[in-house]
Amino acid sequence: MTASSQLTVTGDEMKESSAIDQEPVVPVSEGTDGPERPEERGDEGEPVELRADCIADSAGGLTFDLNAPQDTPAAWSAALVLRLRGGDGADDEVRLPLGPNGAGRLRAVLPSTVALAEGRWNAYADLGDGRDPRRLLPGVNDLRSLVDRRPLAGIGRLGVRIPYATKFGNLALRSWLRGPHAEAGDILVAPGGITVSGRLYGASAGAGARAEARARHHPAAPDAEPATVTVPLTVEGPEFRFTLPYEELAGRWEHGSEPWDLWLRPAEGAGPVRIARLLDDVADKKQVFSYPALPVRTDAEQLRIGPYYTLDNDLAVRVAGPAES
């Protein structure tokens, strides 16, 4: 659904995730995670482009098929290297064995059982030739198995990896690792409120199940909790549905553009579960899924309220004043 009138993105939304696709703009020195270095060139002076085709499986694994430069030896130490952007810990680099897969091709496999921390992972090829790992370019992605993926509802921890091209044209992976997880499905924006349907993974709904909208901005008092609006949850097995009326959100509006994050609490006393949309082949939902912002009249102002996906593909609602509409 595409809105004819969308809410303006302001400061809170720009700062809502540290995982935004940031890469160095200029070539960098050895050992860092920048774009391809200019000295990586073939015999004719042209850059050697290392491209990886990606095939996803329904369990969450990925297979990488690389074009190998001519006469590349099959070094035993060759590896596809994944590095967590901004990370510097021991677990922030993963090396996958890279072996021959036919003439001029190399293959590496990332099994679903290998955990990747949430974030953006840059992809490199270490050909075992003594040179620094080289940044990979995206090839052809076969992500059909990710479309409408339906893992078992009882899965304890859900891993999602989606390959994509960065704004500088390099290959990267967007990774999520969540358990429990509340997968957003259909979203209906109606005059009376926003209705969200979805499916719960890794937890069972019980007495007191509810959805929560939490104000992202913090109150002035240092010990006060952010404002929260709760609504009951309709549950049928792992499927859930709720409607969030506009009135309470509008009544708590103070100024500017105010985001509210959506959570699901499976039962009374259970921990909150973030509502997000992860189980498809779209790495960045915010640029793809668009919903209308409907006008809501208060005593003093006319606001606009509508849902959107954050930079982390989490579901949120934005309440905007007249100046931001």
Image (cartoon, rainbow, N blue to C red):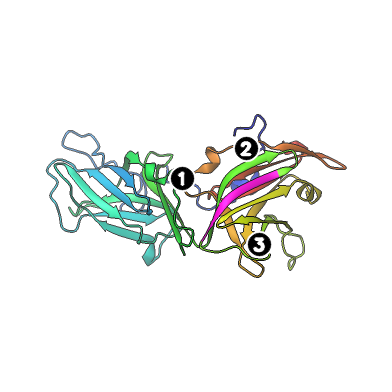
Task: Look at label 1 and name its amino acid.
Answer: Asp
- The residue positioned 18% from the left and 47% from the top of the image is 101
Residue 291: numbered disc: 2
The magenta region covers 194-201
Is 39 or 66 nearer to us in this picture?
A: 66
Quadrant of the snapshot with the N terminus: top right
Instruction: Report the side of 269 relative to 154 (left or right).
Output: right
Q: Position of residue 309 (x, y in %)?
A: 58, 45
Q: Give the mark, 2 or 1, whose residue is nearer the N terminus.
A: 1
Residue at mark 3: 209
The kind of secondary structure element at disc 2 is loop
Instruction: Give how far apart the Cα atoms at labels 3 and 2 are.
Output: 26 Å
Q: Give the mark, 3 or 1, whose residue is nearer the N terminus.
A: 1
Instruction: Report the side of 276 relative to 69 (left or right).
Output: right
Residue 20 on the magenta segment:
no
Instruction: Report the side of 73 relative to 272 (left or right).
Output: left
Q: Residue furthest front?
A: 236
Q: Are marks 2 and 1 in contact (CB under 8 Å)?
A: no
Task: Look at label 2 and name its amino acid.
Answer: Tyr
Task: Look at label 3 and name its amino acid.
Answer: Ala
- The residue positioned 61% from the left and 43% from the top of the image is 187
The kind of secondary structure element at disc 3 is loop
Q: Position of residue 270 (x, y in %)?
A: 62, 68
Magenta-highlighted stretch: main secondary structure?
Answer: strand
Q: Position of residue 190 (x, y in %)?
A: 70, 39
Q: Residue furthest right?
A: 299
